[in-house]
Amino acid sequence: MEWDWDFAWSILPQLLAGFRVTLIATALGAVVAAVLGLVFAILRRSRNRAVARTTGFVVEFIRGTPLLVQLYFIFYVLPDLGIRLPTLTAGVIGMGLHYATYTAEVYRGGIEAVAKGQWEAAKATNLTARQTWIHVILPQAVPPMIPAMANYLLAMFKETPLLSAITVLELMNQARSVANSSYRYVEPMTMVGVMFLIVSVISVIGLRWLERHYGRVGK
Amino acid sequence: MGDWSGYLTLILQGAWVTIKLTLMGSALALVVAFVAGLGRISRRAALRWLSTAYIEFFRGTSIFVQLFWIYFVLPMTGLWAPTPMQAGVLALGLNVGAYGAEVVRGAILAVPRDQYEACIAVNLTRFQRMRHVILPQALPLMLPTFGNNAIELLKATSVVSLISLADMTFQAQVVRSQTGNTLLPFVTILVLYFAMSSVLSLAIRSYERRVTRGLDGVR
């Protein structure tokens, strides 16, 4: 089968519409992952052993099972339990939850990298736990985390095609619907690949810069 | 939900497919990782370029896109029409192999320089140097990340259900559509996936202990 440039041009607008949804899903998923990851990381450090253990197990469980199945779970099971979500919301929650277990590790690494003396100094100056976190620990812990976080952001972006399995009309789904209605797979599938590749290559260059700028923290 | 044991058998058949995919995919990924990883540090520029292109390409797009490309686009080019199983193993192996290649490269470069110099001093050939001196020291460094990669591969196998290969996720969907019950099939496979990834991480940890035995004083 020959590559048809005219056909490729004609489907570009539809693919770009899907690409927009892909970007929105990535951005929202990243916010969920960043916030929830911090919650996981803090709960895992809790002095209450039961809380720390339970959180640890939940994180391990989510990380040990496929994102696709988790998306199905949210998409099919929750409505039966009376929770109806729009598909994009379901997808964003699923991706955010999955990647939160990864970002939680980044937070943990970053927090543990803050010198012990900082905690003691905060206690010595009588800061509350809240003040210690917000004014002492996090400002020092966050910059070294940035490259690792950006890495997972990119990983999440690449995983967005999974959302097509729960009918979100993102890039991959648009490509599949083009392919199914025209019986031409070569152009849409290749264009999806190229689009992802372009974003990834640019992001990798950005990532290298971030790494030089902020240094690395253990994964 | 009367015939639950029959549906469980179906899911267990899917589990076997998932295990086969994981084993074959990991085997391919391991071979590819060493070939591309060694290629990246080769003396020949052409080999270095080829390996880099392969690694960037497969890390820049997701397994989902690669799988669809192999399964739907490759046959259209008239080269080869893979079965779903072949397409699955190929996509999984090539994708995870690209990540593994960077691990191999990193571990080999982490072996101290004086080891290379010592090899030259005792007149080892390049092959002997790699086989008997560098790799035995680099291997323990690779193992933890390889373990993580194997778990990522296991999780990624769920994507093959989308090209209608009857793995565990696919069978859970079959059970869901036949019974209308959503909770039971998905919880079952989530637990099974978690059990598999736990076994993998335990196995890699015990193997790690074996390979690092006797290296305690060195590092």
Image (cartoon, grey):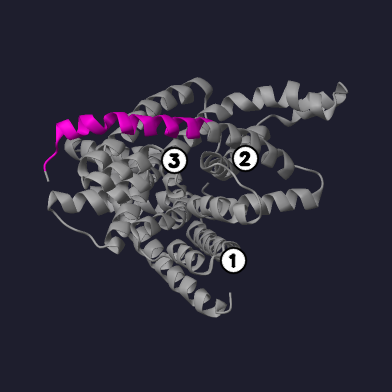
| Whole-number angstrom distance, CA of label 2 to CA of label 3 | 20 Å
Query: Disc 2 residue type?
Result: Ala
Tell me which residue sits at (30%, 37%) in the image: A192
Span highlighted in magenta in the image? A2-27
Does mark 1 fall on the same chain as mark 2? no
Query: Disc 1 residue type?
Result: Leu
Helix, strand or loop under label 2: helix
Query: Disc 3 residue type?
Result: Thr
Tell me which residue sits at (44%, 42%) in the image: A159
Label ID, residue A160: 3
Depicted A121 relative to depicted B162: above or below: above
Helix, strand or loop under label 1: helix
Residue A61, image quadrant: bottom right
Q: Nearer the viewer, residue A10 or A210?
A: A10
Give coordinates of residue B189: x percent, y percent.
53, 64
Q: Residues within 10 Å of mark 2 (few under 14, many from 20)?
A: many
What's the magenta bit mostly, secondary-structure-wise? helix
Does mark 3 fall on the same chain as mark 2? yes
Depicted B100 relative to depicted A24: above or below: below
- Residue labelled with disc 2: A104
